[in-house]
């Protein structure tokens, strides 16, 4: 599909399998596992994305004027706004009440994964500009009759570049833990104010006094029986939140098969029976917390599995960060600090684009102010005022 310029050609792929793993990974690199060929292919092979899910793969490959691969993007035709974590239901409702069709649209994203990372995956030798990539995506929208294109949880550089190219810029908020060179968990505790330090010690003491045994499993150590238990926990969590399970049971087996030791499953056992687990994916310098679930009532178990043992793992493996997923101001009192997240949006209808542009500017100012205020009242000694 020509993009309208002399230098770039875009091709759409209904499966990532149409692109070789080597070509994809040359563009994606190895820093962020969520844009890896293995992770995205596991979503497709397990049926977690596809025609019946509302996430229809249409991955993009971009060729330069010489016909050589220059970049790839994980892209999907979306039939609804579920599983994105950058909420645009109000936009869809407003447009549809005005007589427009918001769906289908395009998402350059990692399904069901509110994990910041690169989305415009260019070869290291590529000289593509953000303006060229933005133009290619606009042309795709026009060619296949999409209302809009959304690039969610992108990097700040991508966000800035797309903003310069005229895309609408949105900011979100997450909470991340940062390793300040800690050698052990007690070093982290020592950096906290007294009240937060005492609170975390009490939560860990109670969680570890409940008669549970904890194990951290990686890659081939994770057996089908562990995944069976985890999937029950995952479904239980979904049921409590009145949602639907996006990920299939097969997806989790494929993870440990294809990503190996990058999959970190922290499990809790009671009398040798699994009762809770937290799934993490390991990047170059970051541990990404993804899904969790449990059966029964256990004091502070969520905090122990998802936050404190993730910090333990990060300190032991000298990682820079733990990213524990979307939302959750309660994470702050446990050492996770507010961080902006970024998304960029192209909306073809001028009226809707103007309305959304006003909204995201006002929202961005409010979130930036919130981050500033929260950062001044953080749990660390040096951040106290």
Image (cartoon, rainbow, N blue to C red):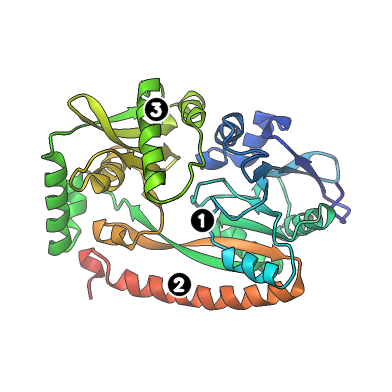
Please count the marks in the image: 3
Determine which quarter of the picture holds residue 156.
Answer: bottom right
Contact (Cβ within 8 Å) of mark 3 with mark 1: no
Q: In the rendered image of this protein, does residue 373 appear above or below residue 83?
A: below
Percent position (x, y) of residue 85?
51, 56
Q: In the rendered image of this protein, does residue 156 appear above or below residue 357?
A: above
Graded by Cα atoms within 10 Å as few (under 14), some (14 to 19) or many (20 or more), the crowding at tag 2 reads: some
- Disc on the earlier residue, 2 or 3: 3
Asked whether, in this view, residue 153 is left or right of residue 274, the answer is: right
In this rendering, the label closer to the viewer, 1 or 2: 1
Please, what secondary structure does the residue beneath circle 1 have?
loop
Graded by Cα atoms within 10 Å as few (under 14), some (14 to 19) or many (20 or more), the crowding at tag 3 reads: many
Determine which quarter of the picture holds residue 270.
Answer: top left
Graded by Cα atoms within 10 Å as few (under 14), some (14 to 19) or many (20 or more), the crowding at tag 1 reads: some
Residue located at (49% from left, 51% from top): 114
Percent position (x, y) of residue 6?
89, 53
In this rendering, the label closer to the viewer, 2 or 3: 3
Circle number at residue 227: 3
Point out the image quarter for the C terminus. bottom left
Q: Which residue is mark 2?
A: 367
Q: CA distance from mark 1 to mark 2?
A: 16 Å
Q: Which residue is mark 1?
A: 85
- Disc on the earlier residue, 3 or 1: 1
Percent position (x, y) of residue 100?
74, 67
Q: In the rendered image of this protein, does residue 346 appear above or below residue 188?
A: below
């Amino acid at each position: 599909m020509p993009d309208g310029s002399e230098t770039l050609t875009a091709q759409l792929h209904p499966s990532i399998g149409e692109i070789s793993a080597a070509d994809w990974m040359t563009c994606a690199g190895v820093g962020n596992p969520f844009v890896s060929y293995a992770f995205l292919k596991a979503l497709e092979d397990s049926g977690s994305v596809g025609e019946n899910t509302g996430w229809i793969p249409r991955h993009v490959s971009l060729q330069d004027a010489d016909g050589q691969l220059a970049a790839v993007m994980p892209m999907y035709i979306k039939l609804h706004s579920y599983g994105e974590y950058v909420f645009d239901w109000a936009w869809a409702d407003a447009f549809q009440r005005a007589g427009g069709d918001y769906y289908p649209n395009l998402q350059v994203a990692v399904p069901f994964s509110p994990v910041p990372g690169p989305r415009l995956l260019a070869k290291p030798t590529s000289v593509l500009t953000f303006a060229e990539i933005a133009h290619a995506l606009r042309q795709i929208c026009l060619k296949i009759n999409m209302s809009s294109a959304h690039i969610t949880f992108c990097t700040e550089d991508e966000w800035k570049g797309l903003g310069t190219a005229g895309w609408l810029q949105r900011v979100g908020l997450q909470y991340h833990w940062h390793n300040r060179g800690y050698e052990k968990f007690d070093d982290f505790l020592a950096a906290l104010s007294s009240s937060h330090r005492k609170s975390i010690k009490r939560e860990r003491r109670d969680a570890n006094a409940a008669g549970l045994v904890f194990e951290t499993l990686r890659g081939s150590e994770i057996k089908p029986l562990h995944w069976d238990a985890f999937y029950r926990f995952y479904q239980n969590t979904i049921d409590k939140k009145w949602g639907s399970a996006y990920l299939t049971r097969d997806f989790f087996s494929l993870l440990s098969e294809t990503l190996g030791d990058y999959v970190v499953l922290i499990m809790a056992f009671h009398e040798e029976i699994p009762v809770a687990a937290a799934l993490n994916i390991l990047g170059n310098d970051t541990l990404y917390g993804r899904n969790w679930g449990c059966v029964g009532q256990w004091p502070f178990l969520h905090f122990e599995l998802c936050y404190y043992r993730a910090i333990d793992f990060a300190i032991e493996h000298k990682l820079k960060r733990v990213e524990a997923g979307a939302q959750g101001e309660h994470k702050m009192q446990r050492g996770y600090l507010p961080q902006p997240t970024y998304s960029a949006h192209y909306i073809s209808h001028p009226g809707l684009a103007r309305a959304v542009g006003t909204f995201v500017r006002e929202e961005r100012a409010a979130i930036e102010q919130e981050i500033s205020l929260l950062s001044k009242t953080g749990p660390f000694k040096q951040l106290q005022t």
